[in-house]
Image (tube, coloured by chain):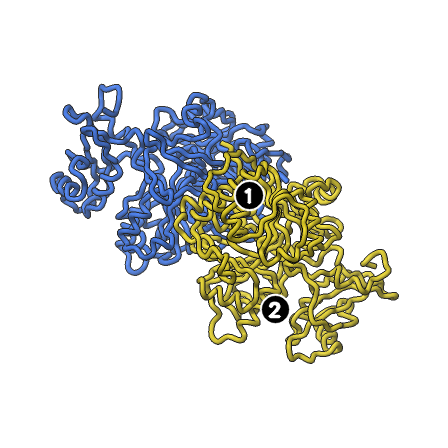
Chain colours: A yellow, B blue
Amino acid sequence: MHVPLTVRDFLDRAELVYGERVGLVDEPDQPATSWGSITYRELARRARGFAAGLDALGIEKGERVAIVAHNGARFVAALYGTCISGRVLVPINFRLHAHEVAYIVAHSGARVLLVDPELDGALGELPVEHRFVLGASTDETLFGSPRAPAAVEIAENELATLNYTSGTTARPKGVRLTHRNLWMNATTFGWHAGVSDRDRFLHVVPLFHCNGWGMPFALAAMGATQVLLRKASGAEVLRRVEAHGITFLGGAPAVVSGVLDAQRSRAGHAPGHGTTRILVAGAPPPTSLIERVESELGWEIIQLYGLTETSPLITINRRRAEFDALSPAERAAKLGRAGAPVIGTRMRIDEHGEVLARANVVMDGYWNDRAATDAAIVDGWFHTGDGGSMDEGGYLSISDRKKDVIITGGENVSSIEVEDCLMAHAGVAEAAVIGVPDANWGESVKALVVLRPGSATSESVLIEHCRARLAHYKCPKSVEFRDALARTATGKLQKFVLRAPYWTGRTRQVN
Amino acid sequence: MHVPLTVRDFLDRAELVYGERVGLVDEPDQPATSWGSITYRELARRARGFAAGLDALGIEKGERVAIVAHNGARFVAALYGTCISGRVLVPINFRLHAHEVAYIVAHSGARVLLVDPELDGALGELPVEHRFVLGASTDETLFGSPRAPAAVEIAENELATLNYTSGTTARPKGVRLTHRNLWMNATTFGWHAGVSDRDRFLHVVPLFHCNGWGMPFALAAMGATQVLLRKASGAEVLRRVEAHGITFLGGAPAVVSGVLDAQRSRAGHAPGHGTTRILVAGAPPPTSLIERVESELGWEIIQLYGLTETSPLITINRRRAEFDALSPAERAAKLGRAGAPVIGTRMRIDEHGEVLARANVVMDGYWNDRAATDAAIVDGWFHTGDGGSMDEGGYLSISDRKKDVIITGGENVSSIEVEDCLMAHAGVAEAAVIGVPDANWGESVKALVVLRPGSATSESVLIEHCRARLAHYKCPKSVEFRDALARTATGKLQKFVLRAPYWTGRTRQVN
């Protein structure tokens, strides 16, 4: 028997089996509009209300509904309400400028736009037919609709969401994710990460990012309670973990770093010590950070690797029995790799050192961009654009964004390796390593560093620190100190932004 | 991107990520032919050897390979070798008589038959082109083939196995299970049961039964070690759990009962106390047995429900947080239900009280039996043939094999409920409750009971025991004592066998 794999499965099971459980705990920071705690039955009711509201607006199956919002219960209800009724959600990065949002709204052809009240003013006019500010008024017109939505059949290869990539290239591209893509991602993720009905999850990662890495689906299937966090800070994350008995959360390395710093100013064990696991993705975490999560928080750290184009999960690195006998540093080195392919995913490194993936989580293609699709998916393999290597056990290590590899004097340098080394210095809070033009070597290695408060480390000390640990050709020739480093919304260093000033007037950013 | 879901995924991941781990621990009882412990890499090598061996025999894609064997490493290797190369495995119940095996071999059209050395003599002549006795000679001709098998593409809706149902009806029917069926079963099972790379599993359930409930696939995906057990006894199960650090096993209620009895003659905690979980399926476990597993073994008991036709997993009942505060007896009552639908499965009870299921784990149909297929799958719903009810949370309770419901004086009696009551009596080891013809009431309730050694309980005591606990119309009118009860290989009571003597000369077995 063939039954279409759709994201309805996740919400339907939550409603049937865990209907009385608290499904969502909305952010309390905005008490006037917060939904507070709602059950999975109530979430399903509001999602159906939303679908009926779209019916009333005349939004057809396959049409797009865009959302620009911080994490919140309405985001989850809109995600479900759109997808279960055959429409396509377009989640937009809330850190984009108004003109970038306008581009995505126009490019996706969205007829409906949902906007966070806090973001509405800055966005100005936008090219969309129906615009709603999330809050009490949408509850009346959309989420609270008492009508049943129209029945609709959905095939598993039809679109569920259209996710725009977060802009390391000139124009964002729309990633077409099907119901089958999302189903496979949620299920294989849920299995590998051990999502269970005893989990209580904290949504730290913005939901616009690959639909919150697929969490709203996997968690609903098992009836796990989802706590929404609007704005992440290390101290706030720790407070929520304690207040809600959180067993499971995710974040980019920068978020994890903030949590570690917050814990240093607390007494005693971290909340969740010995019971909580944290997923790290979006950028490779430094090994020093992995060690600290184990020793200072007592949390299990799980690394994931993937891209918006892969729904996102393609590799996972979780502590396995073979790592138990290792020293903390050795174990951190093992866990610092991106991980091994998850079930159903095949990966290989091509002759250029690029990481390729073949799996049911790979997107259907880019929206209205045949040329980009054909460049990304060749002979059944998706080209990640990342450079990497694979060691025994199929464990992938990402050496760099392919275009970010530094080639100096004919030698390839992994900027991540050098960043990792710098991060191991006690005075360094953040580090980015880039290639800058060099008359002798093509490119030379430059480090941009944010120091910890109170640190007075110098350029020469950091260079010596690296030279004591790495081949000399890999070490920075120069170090510049900064107050902050440009990052994407999800914590990835924006290397092209950091590199740009050094390459002014050139047609390429690599030599 | 669409990539066919095939069972290759499971073995491929085991070989890549857990290649150096012990994948299989073969049964040591037959040291002359046991493979001992082999890694997942070695298992994959032998599975490919087997596929190459089939190439050499000229077995085409889609052709059938039958096996009649006790649990062993060669069974797992043959299962994989057959399926990964596009052939179809026909696992046959090793408790069948020679003429029944001959029927299945002929009906399936198998060109190859693999036979356990211990069973070979009794099977006599069989209508098959290539017959092999599993052992050293098959290692030379099949599993040890050094050649690479021919490349073959497999679509996810193509057959992987053909499983004959274990004979509660006149003739066994061949259940067509596709790669997609098995993939979905293994993955949703793996997630719900929490199969992880730290598991060590004991194969107690015969592998012929729905491919060992899908275990060889789910366990391989996570690199979990699989220990093969040829013949189950309670004492032997406990020895293996201790010797191999087993964290996970499965069995029919009769097996679990044997383990409990064996533990009573041991001192101290059971091996695996506090760490091991046991899956029970094949028949509803009495609530007294569930309580005893928790209290006397310290194992988590997980109930599954499904049929060969559903790959088999469709519902699961696992202790959830809501059950923690209950008394052991209340909790056992909750866990005594068949469970809630797993992710992706929809279930309902039709107007006749029959349990229906709609899911991707439902078979493609019966082999060469269009009429039976059309009777079983109607308007997209599979008819289980079981009677049941569903309470809040979607939890299914199986009241009986639909045809086994006893109707006495116009009242429906669930034989399971009466059996459960009888099993709660200290003197009762096994109980079967059937309807027998009755001039006044249509049918009357009769109990067939196996007493515990040393018990001298009488018919009148047992009837009074029931009358003290159940509505009087449900209680046995008569009790007969037996040495054993007819069961299928997987522990289901064969009610039609037990009923037969009482219905001689009648055209129906219900009134």
Q: Is residue B258 visible?
A: no
If the image is split into quadrants, where does the N terminus of chain B sit?
top right
Q: How crowded is mark 2: few (under 14 residues within 10 Å), some or many (20 or more)?
A: some
Disc 2 from disc 1: Cα separation = 41 Å
> Residue A482 appears at what percent x and percent y?
72, 71
Mark 2 is on which residue type?
Ser
Residue at left offset 58%, top offset 35%: B85
| Depth order, front residue of A35/A294 | A35
Mark 1 is on which residue type?
Thr
Helix, strand, or loop for circle 2? helix
> Residue A486 appears at what percent x and percent y?
70, 64
> Residue B22 appears at what percent x and percent y?
51, 52
Q: Quadrant of residue A461?
A: bottom right
Residue at left offset 19%, top offset 48%: B426
Q: Tell me: B85 left or right of B481.
A: right
Compared to B357, does A289 lie above or below? below
Mark 2–mark 1 CB contact (< 8 Å) = no
Compared to B268, does B462 lie above or below? above
Subunit that carries the residue with mark 2: A
> Residue A190 appears at what percent x and percent y?
51, 50
Residue farthest to the right, as pictured:
A439
If the image is split into quadrants, where does the C terminus of chain B sit?
top left
Subunit that carries the residue with mark 1: A
Q: Mark 2 points at which residue?
A: A288
Helix, strand, or loop for circle 1? helix
Label at residue A24 = none
Q: How crowded is mark 1: few (under 14 residues within 10 Å), some or many (20 or more)?
A: many
Q: Mark 1 points at which residue?
A: A82
Q: Can residue A298 be seen in this view?
A: yes
Residue at left offset 18%, top offset 44%: B469
Q: Tell me: A13 left or right of B471.
A: right
